[in-house]
Amino acid sequence: MAKSKKKSSPPLQFKGIWDYAPAPESTDPVQLRDHYDLFIGGQFVPASSGKSFPSINPATEKTLATVSEANSKDVGRAVRAARKAYEGVWSKTKPAERGKYLFRIARLIQERSRELAILESMDGGKPIRESRDIDLPLVAAHFFHYAGWADKLDYAFPGKTTAPVGVAGQVIPWNFPLLMAAWKLAPALATGNTVVLKPAETTSLSALKLAEIIQDADLPPGVINIVTGAGETGASLVRHPGIDKIAFTGSTEVGKNIRKALAGTNKRFTLELGGKAANVVFEDAPIDQAVEGIINGIFFNQGHVCCAGSRLLLQESIADLLLRKLKDRMETLIVGDPLDKNTDIGAINSKAQLETIRKYLRIGKREGATVHQTSCSLPRKGYWCRPTMFLDVAQSHQVAKEEIFGPVLSVLTFRTVDEAIQMANNVPYGLSGGVWTDKGSKIFRVSNELRAGVVWANTFNKFDPTAPFGGYKESGMGREGGLHGLMPYVKLQSTGRGKG
Ligand code: NAD
């Protein structure tokens, strides 16, 4: 395995002398109970089976709390509570009033944002800098954004009236636990639907803290219900006949199963699935800026990002220079305690995910790729992976085609614009992409021809609640965010205005 320490540029030889002093964030703002129950009908209630599972801090391997495991009976209870709230209260609540509740939730999230950011880092392993500066501000922004839409739906869809769809079942992954909850809850509520939400089994705690906020906001009981558990709980929710719409974010494999389960039903669905994005760097790109963009593209959130720039496509003429700079920059990345404010790369979310990443490291080597990892030391406890890069990768390699969902970059080279576009599109996924060049015309051409839901130009991984997000091909269907994100949650009817 190529260790880059001896090849580092001169300042890096002072590593150790110039290390940052620890700057840990205190966990004092987070008060956790030993156990969390399900949140149904506005109350925390035990699971009918009495079963529970631990939520583990992946940086310490310690249990933070246990969480109740919902079975199909509990899911049924939650769906009934959501139906009752939909028919009795929420579908009759004036749009401006719905908006007020959402504004209230957004403000309460802002007030408790430090606590929630720390919890997100403890439960999920992401660096506090990211949960504090990216996740939490975006969570609040999504609630604010959709609060604003609640009484403006007639303007969102001119010439049409909107009606809610009913009860939405929402299943979310572990990589951005609270943010994925916000992406789903805020548009559903703004449009008058009620919800049963199932968080991922490794990161349920921030959703259950959100349940406390929902209580504090006096949201009518049953408008949001939260059932915790693993895949079987999610599958019960998907199958439940009382659900009108499924919103799923997670792996392509599970997304396909959900689509099969929904075939022949009247349930609407949106699927936000995996990705293997190409980050394409042309020879006329601002190189240092591109290096930062590549780092952000693949190492943000340990690479647990559906739209991560996990395939670097480099124009051959600049490959040597850029890779040298990239290796040097990678060497400076600080891996370790997610609660330390200096940390760039936190813990891998779970033991199972670390095993998946390790499996791909073995596959890549077997396929003939060269592995480059940084020389940083790793904590003894917890789940960690060094920033990693596969060189000498061919398009046919598994590590060039499949989502690894970790801090692992696959590097390929190209010669012409046509070749770059062909390579970028040559995967089953189509969620995101990046293009780095000085030429506006090249940006327009490449971004138009990339079959991806989002394409960033001379930047990467930028999110905004006003912008739609979603994929093509095996990255899913439907959009979340912005005006597009309202559409899955409304039935549209023509008013006839503006005709003839
Ligand atoms: P996953 O598919 O294993 O699990 C996602 C959620 O689905 C979890 O809550 C899980 O408990 C639940 N689930 C598992 N099996 C189920 C079943 N049979 N029926 C219903 N629910 C079931 O995915 P993950 O490992 O938690 O998340 C990582 C994946 O999510 C990656 O592939 C990533 O690309 C994708 N993702 C996509 C987006 C997007 O917007 N496109 C955003 C974030 C993550």
Image (spheres, rainbow, N blue to C red):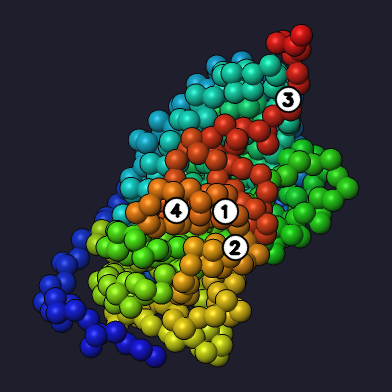
Is residue 29 shown left or right of residue 46? left
The local secondary structure at tag 2 comes to loop
Q: Earlier in the sequence, mark 2 or mark 1?
A: 2
Q: Quadrant of the C terminus?
A: top right
Q: Are marks 1 and 4 in contact (CB under 8 Å)?
A: no
In the rendered structure, find residue 449 and report the number of the disc placed on it. Answer: 1
Cα distance between the residues tagged 2 and 1: 9 Å
Query: Residue at 83% of width from left, 43% of height from top?
Result: 241
Residue 102 seen from this side: no
Q: Amino acid at mark 1?
A: Glu
Q: Are marks 2 and 1 in contact (CB under 8 Å)?
A: yes
Where is 236 relative to 338, above or below? Answer: above
Q: Amino acid at mark 4?
A: Lys
Q: Is mark 1 within 8 Å of ligand 1?
A: no
The local secondary structure at tag 1 comes to helix
- The residue sitting at the right extreme is 264
The local secondary structure at tag 3 comes to strand
The local secondary structure at tag 4 comes to helix
The foreground one among 136 and 465 is 465
Q: Earlier in the sequence, mark 4 or mark 2?
A: 2
Is residue 1 shown left or right of residue 101? left
Can you identify the residue that label 2 sits on?
A: 425
Can you identify the residue that label 3 sits on?
A: 492
Q: Where in the figure is residue 309, as x and y percent of width and height?
A: 46, 62
Cα distance between the residues tagged 1 and 4: 11 Å
Q: Quadrant of the N terminus?
A: bottom left
Query: Residue at 55% of width from left, 49% of height from top?
Result: 448
Cα distance between the residues tagged 4 and 2: 16 Å
Q: Earlier in the sequence, mark 1 or mark 4?
A: 4
Q: Where in the figure is residue 444, as x and y percent of width and height?
A: 48, 48
In the rendered structure, find residue 136 and report the number of the disc placed on it. Answer: none
Can you identify the residue that label 4 sits on?
A: 442
